[in-house]
Amino acid sequence: KIPTFLLYRKLHKKSTTWYNVFAEQYTKGVVHINNILNIMGFKDVEAENMQIDESDYSINIYVTLKRNKNINCPHCGVIDNYVNRYYPIIINHKHFVGKECLIFFNRRRLKCNACNKSFLEPNPFAYYKTKISDETVFYVLNELRHNQSFTDVATKAGISTTEVIRIFDKHVDMKRESLPRILGIDEFKNLSSGRGKYACILTSINENEVVD
């Protein structure tokens, strides 16, 4: 079974952006706009409106969620609020159909009628106070299982190496191994990098084993 977005892309090669086909079919009631979010991995997320701009190397998605009026105020717990203003944020999503993807989330800042304090509506795309989508985090953790370097995974996910290391340190709990009684350190030239960089190998002299 061909995925919906690949099918539409195959049938409409002459379109300047194949997402326009979704927009056209959406207005006719054939394809719902939330199907795009489902394809991207965001289940049960309802969008009020969405605009997608595609270039040769990147995809920018501008989205506003459907207004949820049943949100409790985190300060007093009352469900009685209104939209104070919008607070746009940029979320880095993993490569989508082979292109770098950014989500421009037009997030609402709500104000409580009871206590007169403001708060943000929930963000279903990323963890608390992060600008990387949940799907990107899952993708990075899964790729790191396959004996790849942080730099290689960062290139695939479209984020920095520092962000990959931060994700690894936050979500992976590795037990610290004890050092051997006598530690051997041997420096050698890393020819696999092709740049002549030096690396080292750590060994246990007593047990004649490689430590790292």
Image: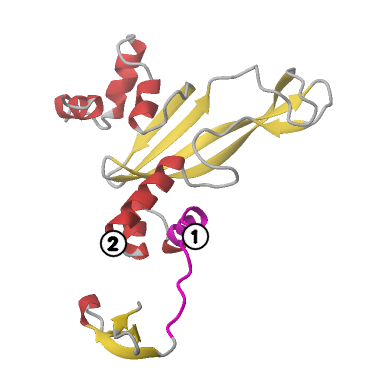
List the residue tagged with mark 1. 169
Question: Dot 1 lies on which element?
Answer: helix
Residue 172 % position (x, y): 46, 56
List the residue tagged with mark 2. 147
In this rendering, position of residue 123 left or right of residue 103: right
Residue type beneath disc 1? Asp
- Residue at 71%, 20% in the rendered image: 82
Residue 157 % position (x, y): 35, 51
Residues tagged 2 and 1 counted as in contact (Cβ below 8 A): no
Q: CA distance from mark 2 to mark 1?
A: 16 Å
Task: Specify the color scheme.
Answer: secondary structure
Q: Nearer the viewer, residue 194 or 211?
A: 211
Question: Which mark identifies residue 30?
Answer: none
Residue type beneath disc 2? Asn
- Residue at 34%, 49% in the rendered image: 142
Q: Which residues are magenta?
A: 163-180
Q: Residue 2: name its quadrant.
A: top left
Q: Is residue 65 magenta?
A: no
